[in-house]
Image (tube, helix red, strand yellow):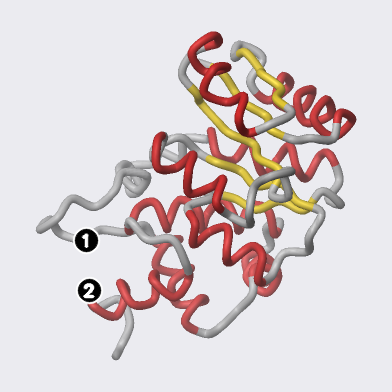
Amino acid sequence: MSLYVIDDHPLVRQALGMLLRRIKPASKVVELEKLSELQAAIIKNGAPQLFVLDLLLPGVKGANAISDIKGLYAEVPLVVISAMPAGEAEETCLEAGADLYIEKSMAANDISSAIAGLFVEEKTSEEEDEDLPIAPGSDTKLSKRQKQLILMLDRGLSNRDIAAELSISEHTVKVHLWRLFRRLGVKSRTQTLHFARMHGFLMS
């Protein structure tokens, strides 16, 4: 299994590669300059375990790269890293299939923590299956934290607001939301709230 970093800026690419080697020392880290190099790199270096993708790659329009990669590797986490502030850009990326949006201006430790959170298995007796997608026709069971997040999203709270209420980092909030989205099979806050109302987690 390999971790793939795709960024046209050499220093950023190398720095991300170093972070990933600390997070997953047993995995191979492959650094690429262009999206067009990805398929050949996967054939050479093995199946992907993670993608870290620069949003503004030369010759790639907007979030098209995200859609292209997710179309081939739907179950592999994809992290977008960008110089653009989170907001509309983050929402666009998540809608396209990204699992996490990280600003390049973040501290290295925060970037590392956010990415590492994608590999953390949260298994308690109550939350045993919370990472597994809900099967069609099955009962919808969510952990207390996931139900709490839905209520906070319904209140319109931002990631920063949620972090403050729960006394956790904003980056941990993003990982919790990623797990919730994956559990419900959705890609955005709006889709999450629609699902919640349809399944009785929120009053219509």
The label on residue 140 is 1
Q: Viewed as shown, does residue 8 lie left or right of 94?
A: right
Q: Viewed as shown, does residue 18 lie left or right of 153?
A: right
Residue 156 drawn at (x, y percent): 56, 83
Q: Which residue is drawn at 65% across and 40% down?
A: 53
Q: State the separation of the CA atoms marked 1 and 2.
A: 8 Å
The local secondary structure at tag 2 comes to loop
Residue 9 drawn at (x, y percent): 84, 35
Where is mark 2, residue-wise?
Answer: 199
Considering every residue shown, the one lying at the far left of the view is: 137
* Dot 1 crowding, Cα within 10 Å, few <14, some 14–19, many 20+: some
Q: Do the residues labelled 1 and 2 touch (CB within 8 Å)?
A: yes
Q: In terms of sequence position, does the residue under pointer 1 or pointer 2 come before the other?
A: 1
Q: How many marks?
A: 2
Q: Which residue is drawn at 44% across and 75% down?
A: 190
Q: Is residue 52 above or below residue 203?
A: above
